[in-house]
Image: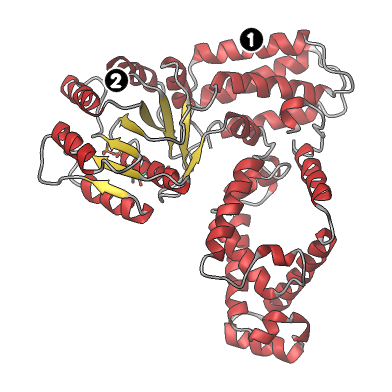
Amino acid sequence: MVLDNLGSSLRGSLDKLQGKSRLDEDDVDEIVREIQRSLLSADVDVSLVMDLSSSIEDRALHEEPPGGTSARDHVLKIVYEELVDLIGESTDIPLEPQTILLAGLQGSGKTTTAAKMAWWFSTKGLRPAVIQTDTFRPGAYDQAKQMCEEAEVEFYGDPDEEDPVKIAREGMEATEDADIHIVDTAGRHALEEALIDEIEEIERQVNPDRSMLVLDAAIGQGAKDQAREFDDSIGIDGVVITKLDGTAKGGGALTAVNETDSSIGFLGTGETVQDIERFEPNGFISRLLGMGDLKQLSERVERAMQETQEGEDDWDPEDIMKGSFTLKDMQKQMEAMNKMGPLDQVLDMIPGLGGGFKDELPDDAMDVTQDRMRSFDVIMDSMTEEELENPRIVGASRVRRIARGSGKGEELVQELLEQHKMMERTIKQFQGMGDGDMQRMMKKLQNQGGGGGGGLGGMGPFGD
Ligand SMILES: Nc1nc2c(ncn2[C@@H]2O[C@H](COP(=O)(O)OP(=O)(O)OP(=O)(O)O)[C@@H](O)[C@H]2O)c(=O)[nH]1
């Protein structure tokens, strides 16, 4: 995750402020140093770091905290606002017909991003097509075609044609019924003149509504020059940062955004077509500071629930809130959890659990949890329909039989039954709650964000 270090190191300094009502110069100094250290080690440009830290320092020392606000919440709010300001708004990408041109260095993730973006638009009810003009890398055509098949979106390419401008023209014609045209280009070094001429020609040919620069999160200081060159030749409107699942850096990409005076549009978080997120500055920074990102989380939950429900006409998660909670429901929930993606990414999005909580877990805790979910699934497959519907009938002899059948230990079967009872109890508490109660509870959960227990209720940007 970009600037991940910032999240964890800053939380340490912020936690030291617990219980204080005023900030002194030493406190501010320590926090500013922490921010500088993290940003510089994440490859953010030095002058940007200096600008940001002097604004934070100035505001933290001179702004009067709103009445009743702790020193910790006050400084957190300032850091949050300054970071949102640095990163800026998300690139405007209206849900309407448009052409998007992707540019970037070799291997930055353009082809993958083209298919991911097309998938994303298709989930919004639009009809996207990917046009592959990369005649430079031999595998690009097959890769793009395969990913578009996975994303179930239209694809145009011509492996026998050598002229990318011609492919762009014919591709636009062949896919004229599509709403969204995403034009993938060959990877190039921004300082190679012939390649720059070529992308300018493609740009003139397809006349894009927006040109986006695809950047690997691990790119360092070189990002600045590259971004400027691309911006000078085709004009960069937005940036996609890829491979955020694999690096703690990302500062180079932020520098590029600043250099081209553009903004971030999407984040790539994995190798499959669904590993893409629309960039939301508020959620992104909240997540970074360990305050969770409820919006992303609820979108993932919704998507996972939808997928789990497909072809399961008889299973409706809302029924859980009305009737009894069976092992079958639990199995469905686990399936939905699995579809949300790696557990550690999901945890990052839960307010109060992200960052700080995760840091305290042993390294292999996530694997263990995921292993346990898989084992539970195998155990449930060895149970009868009657047992799944009514787990109370599972006594000692049935436990033995299920353990034998599933090849898992009896203790694990018992553990599953315990887990189910616990979930059932929790759900009982929710049952009977009206919508108003539910909303109040969600609000309360959100306001508990911030890890160390310092509630952020009533502080404008955090409470919503
Ligand atoms: N882990 C991870 N891998 C990614 C992500 N995006 C792309 N990749 C991988 O990065 C590698 C390069 O991605 P491509 O999409 O082929 O990059 P490209 O920019 O089209 O490459 P060229 O055509 O050579 O310029 C591939 O192995 C992708 O699977 C991401 O968000 N996360």
Q: Which one is in front, 221 or 124?
A: 124
How many labels were placed on the picture?
2
Q: Is residue 192 left or right of residue 408?
A: left
Residue 372 seen: no
State whether residue 159 is above or below residue 400. Answer: above
User: Residue 249 at what x, y percent from top left?
Assistant: 49, 31
Corner quadrant of residue 178 = top left
Residue located at (82% from left, 32% from top):
457
User: Residue 151 at what x, y percent from top left?
Assistant: 38, 52
* Amino acid type shown at disc 2: Ile
Mark 1 element type: helix
Mark 2 element type: helix
How dense is the environment of label 2, judged by Cα within 10 Å: few (below 14), some, or many (20 and up)? many
User: Residue 412 at what x, y percent from top left?
Assistant: 68, 75
Q: How is the image coloured?
A: secondary structure
Badge 1 or badge 2: first in the primary sequence: 1
Q: Which one is in front, 122 or 396?
A: 122
Task: List the residue tagged with mark 1.
Answer: 54
Verify CB contact (< 8 Å) between mark 1 and mark 2.
Answer: no
Corner quadrant of residue 382 = bottom right
Ligand 1 - quadrant of the structure image: top left
Residue 446 disc label: none
Q: Is residue 296 left or right of residue 158?
A: right
Q: Which one is in front, 53 or 326?
A: 326
Residue located at (48% from left, 27% from top):
92
Task: List the residue tagged with mark 2.
Answer: 234
Residue 228 seen: yes
Corner quadrant of residue 137 = top left
Give the spatial CA distance, label 1 vs label 2: 34 Å
